[in-house]
Image (cartoon, grey):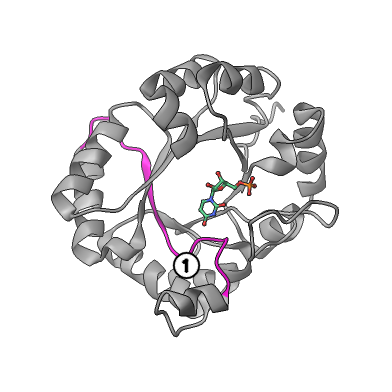
Amino acid sequence: MIHPAPTPRIVVAVDRPDLGQAVALADRLDPTLCRLKVGMELFTAAGPAAVEALQKRGFEVFLDLKFHDIPNTVAGACRSAAALGVWMINVHAGGGPRMLAAAAEAVGAASHRPLLVGVTVLTSLDQAELAAVGVAASPAEQVLRLARCCADAGLDGVVCSPLEIAPLRAALGSDFKLVTPGIRGPGDAVDDQRRTLAPAAALAAGADYLVIGRPITGAADPLAALQAITASLDGA
Ligand SMILES: O=c1ccn([C@@H]2O[C@H](COP(=O)(O)O)[C@@H](O)[C@H]2O)c(=O)[nH]1
């Protein structure tokens, strides 16, 4: 019996300053092993052409622009993003229930419906920095609060750190998508991330998708790094 290729769980963050460098990186990766994430650095430099170039190479694209504005503006941005034919888009959960509902409604009405997830507490934030911006709750408490807002508004899931997966799964069930950046193996530089976990541990905890940038894109051989992480997920 032929088994279909499993859906890639790894989303590689193509944080590159221009289209040429983004395409060069994509050409050193493999769409059967990963999806790609286009974030604000690349999209600001190259726009929709970046999405199109990566899609043409066979990659599904997570457009990570973290929309955060008044409901009407975010709804329009979500419509424009959906029209690019991307696999997933996101908004900041902190935009509030009405903004989240407007985003969900806009995506629901689109002819191509991407997954819509809400960014909870950035994985670069720890308890002290969260307190500095006026949030007294722990990161885990705040993530859960924002994730409930996302679920209530009809979003498909959230972006969270892999450390918060267990309480989110318990509260929001198995269909709610958990997308986790902050992925670092024991030998990796932590960089600016603060709430991190290794790839296999994140998957075993129940993450749906692992967003990984520098541990792959900063490697001398990005494909070898991707293959090694993919192999480490086997059985997780
Ligand atoms: O909370 C968040 C939300 C988004 N990101 C993005 O994920 C990647 C992570 O890259 P690394 O190089 O693996 O740190 C990056 O594009 C961020 O913008 C996040 O890290 N945390």
**How many numbered badges does the structure rendering display?**
1
Q: Amino acid at mark 1?
A: Gly
Q: Residue 13 falls in which quadrant of the image?
A: top right
In the displayed structure, does residue 58 sit left or right of residue 187?
left
* Residue interval drawn in magenta: 110-126
Task: Answer whether residue 212 is magenta in the image.
Answer: no
Could you say which is closer to the camera, residue 195 or residue 200? 195
39 above or below 30? below
Report the residue marked by disc 1: 173
User: Percent from the top left, x then y, of residue 107?
Assistant: 25, 42
The image shows residue 200, relative to residue 227, as above or below, that is: below
| Residue that lies at the very extreme toward the bottom in this rendered image | 136
Q: Where is residue 173 shown, x and y percent of the image?
A: 47, 67
- Residue at screen point 74% across, 60% down: 201
Q: Quadrant of the N terminus?
A: top right
- Examine the rendering and report whether any part of residue 171 can be seen: no
| Disc 1 crowd, CA 10 A, few/some/many (<14, 14-19, 20+) | few
Drawn side of residue 156 relative to residue 227, left or right? left
Q: Residue at x 36, y 57 (%)?
A: 92
Viewport quadrant of the C terminus: bottom right
**Residue 227 placement: quadrant:** top right
Q: Residue at x 42, y 30 (%)?
A: 43
Instruction: State the image coordinates of residue 84 (x, y, percent, origin top left).
Output: 33, 26
Q: Secondary structure at mark 1?
A: loop
Comparing 45 with 235, the one in front is 45
Q: Main secondary structure of the magenta part?
A: loop
